[in-house]
Image (cartoon, coloured by chain):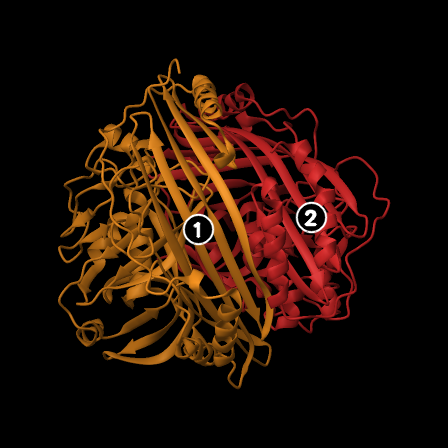
Chain colours: A red, B orange
């Protein structure tokens, strides 16, 4: 089954589905990617992938049924499974799938110049190796990927949206003695310098050798964008989901209008950000997207909703549905979560700088408590890395940490679906020796 | 197929079923279908790999074209790769005690609704049950004409209960996954246990961070074996120079009480009848009585690194194989649980796991316990919560003083290189001297 043939069957699915359900929705993802991997400094694997995914959702009397398949030609079996699934779901208040709206404009997460090819990914790998070569380190592994794809949604109310997307990513791991370094970059264009990735990965490994022990105690800490993103993703992101809020699984439930972070901090989802990795004009249910001010100047303003959760609790969808659920189901997420506040130089005063953490996913998503190992920690002062720290842990609470922010850095970057700078915190508990 | 020294094709098709029950509501009960294949071709330059959906619809001529295409994209590679000789054979998949296909989606949903209800006791404000069942038909063939195939079902459930009091939230969680068929019947006690633990955790204190003696329960000690030793023994990392265990075969790296094994042929959750390269699976002793004895291998890493056996290559459907753990465990010692607590004297007992992570090149790992108890004079006293442990691979195995006399396995999923594969970890109760405990409290 080729792509254009797959698109042609959308009408067939909608027509057939409408015979056995009140409403029908089809979501189709098609893509291809080319990637290559390094083993030490040598390219060892070259990979080319093609991907199809078709999800069907039907709604009858407030009962929602779903199914998905990797084979569009198999849509009849998929539709039957969706109808069977709907018979088991608990019925709920349902006010309909969205109808069509004018959502014109260029694709936001798409660069037509991205043409996945072996030579291009090879060039990225070579660039990273060259950058790492500026430091006395060995490259252990690395990868570069270019992908393009098309997402299409159609429903029985007449929606028929389609968008192109592109993704370019590269990462490198290095080692010197027993000190490791890791750096990466992701964009919807080939607009980053692979040599800079290699240079930073090399710097981190080379500069972390001969670390000194640090006494257990309370310190000012600077979380790099990567370290901050790891902890925020594990705890704050699920707490902003309307489903978790109404189910009693969010510590932020009941806190709308209350201060939940330092007054200088704002957190919002910006789905319309040009060139954002998650940017889109419509969400995974066809709801138009908009900016969502989760936290404004420290005050909790809004939670994220998809249609199902919104209808159930008398709210409106915030356009926050993503296809991240099991079996291709829509689930609540965010598109580009941005953390902003006044940005300053963070490293002038003494602090413990933390490049990354080991084990952020083990944080308690409900209470926010975490205790994780530090990766590439340094004592910093006067604007520079002073001495590497050999080994230490940090223990604390992500919700508490939001009140202890004393500054944001000028190094804003994209980490997955988050866009954030370094964050300086006061009074953090470090477990050393 | 000019330039192709070897190729293989791994084709996985099947059906997965998910059921999600949240606070008495059946949020979804749905089945999905998949069909993925990976075609690997080895040329003098290295591996060229094609991954494709809907392989079953291809004709032989199209497959030959894909092999040629895989070989041609290897042109950018620069590694002349050797493979160890093929290791043929397979282990039979254990029969299903109750075939989930014989139970309707509706009946499974009803059983799960009852299970979820069992966790709803006073003080609990949210209960949730997730069920997953995945049938995979796996076919393997290579350029020597060798073919093999199997069908396996992995299924299981997780039950979560959330307790709340005065703005404090805590959760209890239990999961059971298996390759033996439907396992959701008669699990109400387990659901209640999760709920009771969530309530108890409301009164637990955060642990005090620092260096102390720690007793790990079998689940957590299994995660310890996985994070502290297992990953660093994966020979692709060794070959890359990204493991502190490189070059240390035959060296003592732990106390003689420590033997750590990975065995994909065991009928546990990480079971593989044969691996993702068609190799027969079997037992690898990574550490034998404190001495590093072997690495986990694919055919490529065995030829390049040596020490061990192939049969440890695993892959998600549609993804290229990687060297992975399967069923990893610390062998039983001779001590009873009570003897271990008595020997600990004063320290901390850590139970349950929320997972862990390792930096194998640096040799530092972290893993997290769901809860624990202070040990005072050999007795468990105050309950503590949110406790992590970290350690250094080359030091920490010397701190294992005692291993208990009964190994228990727990199921989970392990991530590496963007792929998640089913694993089991296990151990007996284990006593660690000088454990680095991360906690923010003063208990």
Quarter of the image where one finds residue A425: bottom right
Q: Nearer the viewer, residue A353 or B156?
A: B156
Looking at the rendered structure, the secondary structure element under dot 1 is strand
Q: Disc 2 to disc 1, how far (Cα)?
A: 44 Å
Q: Nearer the viewer, residue A310 or A160?
A: A160
- In the image, is A136 to the left or to the right of B162? left
Residue A14 visible in image:
yes
Looking at the rendered structure, the secondary structure element under dot 2 is strand
Estimate the x, y position of residue B340 in percent, counting from the top left.
20, 71
Q: Which residue is mark 2?
A: A26
Residue A374 tag number: 1
**10 Å crowding of disc 1: few (<14), some (14-19), many (20+):** many
**Mark 2 / mark 1, whichever is N-terminal:** 2
**10 Å crowding of disc 2: few (<14), some (14-19), many (20+):** many
Estimate the x, y position of residue B28 in percent, counting from the top left.
59, 63
The residue that appears at 27% across and 32% down in the rendered structure is B299
């Amino acid at each position: 089954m080729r792509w254009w043939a797959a698109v042609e069957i959308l009408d067939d699915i909608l027509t057939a589905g409408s015979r056995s359900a009140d409403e029908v929705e089809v979501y189709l993802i098609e893509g291809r990617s080319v990637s290559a991997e390094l083993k030490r400094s040598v390219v060892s694997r070259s990979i080319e992938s093609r991907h199809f995914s078709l999800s069907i959702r039907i709604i009858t009397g407030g009962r929602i049924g779903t199914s998905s398949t990797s084979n569009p030609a198999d849509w009849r079996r998929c539709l039957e499974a969706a109808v069977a699934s709907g018979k088991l779901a608990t019925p709920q208040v349902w006010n309909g799938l969205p109808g069509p709206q004018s959502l014109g404009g260029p694709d936001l997460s798409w660069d037509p110049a991205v043409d996945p090819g072996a030579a291009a990914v090879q060039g990225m790998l070579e660039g990273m190796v060259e950058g790492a070569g500026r430091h006395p380190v060995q490259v252990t592994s690395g990868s570069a990927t270019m992908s393009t794809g098309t997402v299409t949604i159609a429903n029985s109310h007449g929606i028929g949206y389609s968008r192109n997307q592109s993704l370019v990513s590269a990462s490198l791991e290095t080692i010197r003695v027993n000190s490791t370094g890791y750096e990466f970059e992701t964009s919807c264009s080939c607009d980053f310098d692979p040599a800079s990735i290699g240079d930073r990965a090399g710097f981190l490994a080379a500069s972390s050798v001969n670390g000194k022990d640090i006494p257990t105690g309370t310190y000012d800490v600077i979380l790099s964008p990567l370290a901050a993103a790891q902890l925020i993703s594990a705890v704050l992101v699920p707490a902003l989901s309307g489903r978790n809020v109404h189910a009693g699984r969010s510590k932020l439930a009941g806190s709308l209008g209350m201060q939940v972070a330092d007054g200088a901090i704002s957190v919002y989802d910006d789905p319309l950000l040009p060139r954002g990795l998650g940017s889109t004009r419509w969400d995974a249910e066809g709801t138009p997207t908009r900016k969502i001010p989760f936290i404004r100047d420290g005050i909790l303003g809004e939670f994220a909703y998809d249609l199902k959760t919104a209808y159930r609790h008398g709210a409106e969808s915030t356009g926050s549905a993503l296809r991240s659920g099991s079996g291709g189901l829509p689930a609540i997420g965010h598109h580009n979560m941005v953390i902003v506040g006044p940005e300053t130089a963070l490293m002038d005063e003494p602090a413990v700088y933390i490049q990354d953490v080991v084990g952020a996913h083990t944080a308690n998503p409900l209470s926010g408590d975490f205790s994780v190992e530090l990766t590439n920690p340094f004592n910093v002062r006067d604007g520079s890395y002073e001495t590497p720290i050999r080994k230490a842990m940090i223990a604390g609470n992500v919700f508490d940490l939001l009140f202890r922010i004393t500054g944001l850095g000028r190094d804003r970057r994209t980490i997955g679906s988050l866009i954030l700078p370094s964050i300086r915190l006061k009074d953090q508990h470090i477990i050393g020796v | 197929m000019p330039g192709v020294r070897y190729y293989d094709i791994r084709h996985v098709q099947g059906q997965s079923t998910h059921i999600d029950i949240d606070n008495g509501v059946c949020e979804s009960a749905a089945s999905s279908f998949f069909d993925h294949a990976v075609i690997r071709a080895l040329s003098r330059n290295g591996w060229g790999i094609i991954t494709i959906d809907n392989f079953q619809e291809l004709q032989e001529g199209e497959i030959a074209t894909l092999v040629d295409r895989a070989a041609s994209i290897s042109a950018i590679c620069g590694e002349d790769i050797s493979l160890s000789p093929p290791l043929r054979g397979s282990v039979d998949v254990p029969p299903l005690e109750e075939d989930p296909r014989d139970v309707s989606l509706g009946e499974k949903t009803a059983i799960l609704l009852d299970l979820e209800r069992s966790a709803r006791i006073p003080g609990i404000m949210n209960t949730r049950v997730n069920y997953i069942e995945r049938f995979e038909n796996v076919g393997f063939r290579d350029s020597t004409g060798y073919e093999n195939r199997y069908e396996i079902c992995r299924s299981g459930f997780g039950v979560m209960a959330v307790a709340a009091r005065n703005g404090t939230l805590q959760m209890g969680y239990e999961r059971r996954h298996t390759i033996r068929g439907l396992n959701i019947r008669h699990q109400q006690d387990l659901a209640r246990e999760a709920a009771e633990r969530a309530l108890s955790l409301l009164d637990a204190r955060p642990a005090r961070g620092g260096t102390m003696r720690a007793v790990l329960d079998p689940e957590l000690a299994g995660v310890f074996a996985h994070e502290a030793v297992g990953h660093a023994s994966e020979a692709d990392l060794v070959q890359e120079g990204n493991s502190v265990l490189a070059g240390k075969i035959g060296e003592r790296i732990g106390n003689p009480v420590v033997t750590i094994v990975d065995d994909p042929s065991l009928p546990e959750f990480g079971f593989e009848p044969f691996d993702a390269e068609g190799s027969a699976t079997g037992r690898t002793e990574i550490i034998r009585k404190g001495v590093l004895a072997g690495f986990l291998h694919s055919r490529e890493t065995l030829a390049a690194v040596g020490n061990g056996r192939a049969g440890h290559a695993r892959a998600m459907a549609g993804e290229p194989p990687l060297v992975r753990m399967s069923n990893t465990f610390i062998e039983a010692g001779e001590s009873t649980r009570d003897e271990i607590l008595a020997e600990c004297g004063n320290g901390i007992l850590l139970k349950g796991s929320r997972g862990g992570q390792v930096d194998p090149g640096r040799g530092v790992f972290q893993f997290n316990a769901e809860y624990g108890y202070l040990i005072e004079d050999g007795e468990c006293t105050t309950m503590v919560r949110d406790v992590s442990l970290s350690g250094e691979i080359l030091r920490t195995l010397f701190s294992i003083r005692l291993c208990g006399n009964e190994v228990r396995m727990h199921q989970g999923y392990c991530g590496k290189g963007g792929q998640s594969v089913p694993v089991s970890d296990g151990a007996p109760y284990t006593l660690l001297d000088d454990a680095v405990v991360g906690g923010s409290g003063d208990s």
